[in-house]
Amino acid sequence: MGMSAKLEFTNHKVYETTLAGRPLKLETGMMCGLSNASVMATYGETAVLCNVTASAKPREGVDFFPLSVDYEEKMYSVGKIPGSFQRRESRPSEKAILTSRCIDRPIRPLFPKDMRNDCSVVATVMSVDPDCSPEVTAMIGVSAAIAISDIPWDGPISGVKVGLCDGEIVINPTLEQRQKSEMDVTVASTGELVAMIEAGANEVEDDVMFDAIMKAHEVNKEVVEFINGMVAEIGKPKFDFVSNDPDPAIMDEIEEFCIEDVKKALDTDDKNVRDAALLPIYDAVHEKFDERFEGNEAKLDEIMYLVQKHVVRAWLKDEHKRVDGRGIDEIRPLNAKVDLLPRTHGSGMFTRGQTQVLSVATLAPVSESQKLDGLDEETEKRYIHHYNFPSYSVGETKPSRGPGRREIGHGALAERALLPVIPSVDEFPYTIRVVSEVLSSNGSTSQGSVCGSTLALMAAGVPIKAPVAGISCGLITGDEGVKGDFMTMIDIQGLEDFYGDMDFKVAGTKKGITAIQMDLKVHGLTPEIIKEAFAKTNKARNYILDEIMLPVISEPRAELSKFAPKMLTMTINPEKIGDVIGKQGSVIQKLQELFECTINIEENGRIFIATLDTDKGNAVMGVIDIIANGPEVGAFYQGTVTRLMDFGAFVAIAPGVEGLVHISKLDVKRVEKVEDVVSVGDTIKVKVTEIDDRDRINLSRRDALVELDGMAVEEGADEDRRPRKEGRAGFRSRR
């Protein structure tokens, strides 16, 4: 057998720099030899393997660039085994989907618009250092991989996170810094423009947010320069691809044929009217030009898209005219309503033109918070926001298939926007879920969800710190792109989003910003555009709050819905938790059954009781107090007769806490036999008269009848009835 030679990785290269004071290393040429390019990105001790591949041929029959971005979390990266039944990673977590979207958004506009080759980006998280963000590491690694590959791309980009700790702007905050940071912002940039912003913040002012974005942008530029150094050394030449752009001569001919009709059709604020008016134009174009596109008739629909795009953009940019006749800084007609659903805990509906969202709030015990199985320190969340986008909201007939990436992204954005104003668990001991149902969609439903959800939370009586509203801002650029003349407009509708260059969504309170999401179709934005978008959205959200939302409901309701559980809290000595739970949970189960409530006990002795009947809640708290702290001498209790003896009756005043009512203390009159007065299972009122040195509890029904019901002791009741010292076998007192 011939011996093989030792394999050497001759192309192995390592590039090193520092980012925010920690080592950043990009290495290539050792792993994954068959992808178009592969980079292992290591930041601190976080390692993400980034691969990019592209198909050699274009995909037939698609009218978009087919890019897929997957960010894969592996539980081994944090030394854990997955919690699922199969013990393997299943569907991506919500966080992973959101990160995939965060990487997708800045890289997508940089690919050629006319390319139809499939392209796949996979970032696999293999090791996580809590101080060094795997999301940032993945974004930089992916950018480096595409940049050095042979896939046509106008990058690189870089991304960093920004925090605000003690008033200081911090780049890539550590775990400790993140815990006290006032914001969590991800900023991606090209060498000269800001390409993406994704932010959650604790009511941070516009100016501070702007400074943080700019600071991140400066750091990003340095990383882009570092990646460009790699490209100069090992970058492959970009491959040629078949352009999907239509022949300019044919494009002009079709445009000339239909543009006037298209203008007339688009000139309306009603999406249904517009769609109906466009149908005959499409038919006429197909009739006239189909034979020129034999076997590729779908191409005509793409050309029609471009004609509409041309019309909408020219109107906006040259004539400052909007499809629905609004002014550039005019918001569509608005409406807010609450209490639309009688038995839910809180509901609110927000309508902006043809965009309409109904949000419904539900309150539940803290124990129902969502458990998270992820790579970071967050193990559960008690504020959950879900967003549903049914096909009827855009007048289509597709069956519902559960939430896609877009729905998860929009739900997370609305969640982020409201999280800063949600009260702490101590102030409001509930898990809160809000579901936003999009009823009709024509632009910026995510920000409609923010407004609808604020209404629903206030209607449900959740004491939010301040109401939140959100709005989007759009952009149209000219031939010179973002550096030439541009124009921004508030509250973009579907067409303006579709044919425009940006959807810049900002949510916040009067005090400041709580969430941002910026989607771009251009390479990036200049500081001037960002500043203008901030100013416009600030003005718009204050208007929505003051004029539309607050007149309908000015503050959170003081009373919860009668259908919402009432949460009561108490604290006991942690050593007594075992007594309250009982053997195999017998005591706690009995209490829940008896008082129709749910009881949750935390390790620190904090107890949460959820009930629909406050009286029963207070009664169970009284019983838990007896179990944990023992009964109080002189106090009155409701008890159940458990056993009868000749000398008296044993009465349980709480599970596991029993005392004796001597025959002489059973009634206000003389008693011959115990069974003449009480039977096993009877509920009676008793007073604790003594707890002796052996922890035995003496009770009196007579004292309770006299003191609580105002009865008088009859004559002769005590003749020859001195309490005798009977044996008290089987007596159980408090523990």
Image: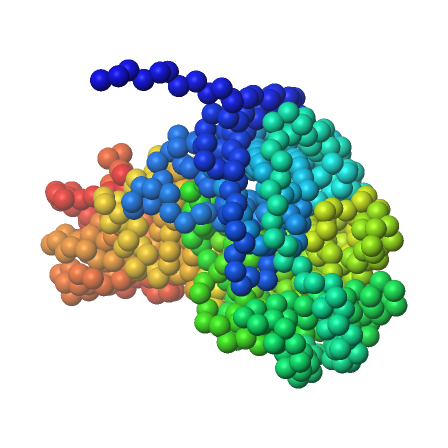
x 47%, y 55%: residue = 567
Quarter residue 496 falls in? bottom right
x 62%, y 31%: residue = 235
Residue 586 screen position, x and y as percent: 24, 49
Does residue 615 lie above or below 393 as drawn? Answer: above
Closest to the observer, 175 or 509: 175
Tell me the quarter of the image containing the C terminus: top left
Closest to the observer, 651 or 263: 263
Closest to the observer, 238 or 361: 238
Tell me the quarter of the image containing the N terminus: top left
Residue 604 relative to residue 101: left or right? left
Give the total number of marks visible in the rendering: 0
Residue 170 relative to residue 537: left or right? left
Q: Is residue 731 something one can see in this rendering?
A: yes
Does residue 72 lie above or below 395 as drawn? Answer: above
Residue 193 relative to residue 416: left or right? right
Residue 340 screen position, x and y as percent: 58, 75
Closest to the observer, 580 or 66: 66
Residue 696 screen position, x and y as percent: 24, 41
Residue 669 screen position, x and y as percent: 24, 63
Residue 647 relative to residue 665: left or right? left
Q: Is residue 146 something one can see in this rendering?
A: no
x 88%, y 68%: residue = 319
Q: How is the image coloured?
A: rainbow
x 76%, y 50%: residue = 511
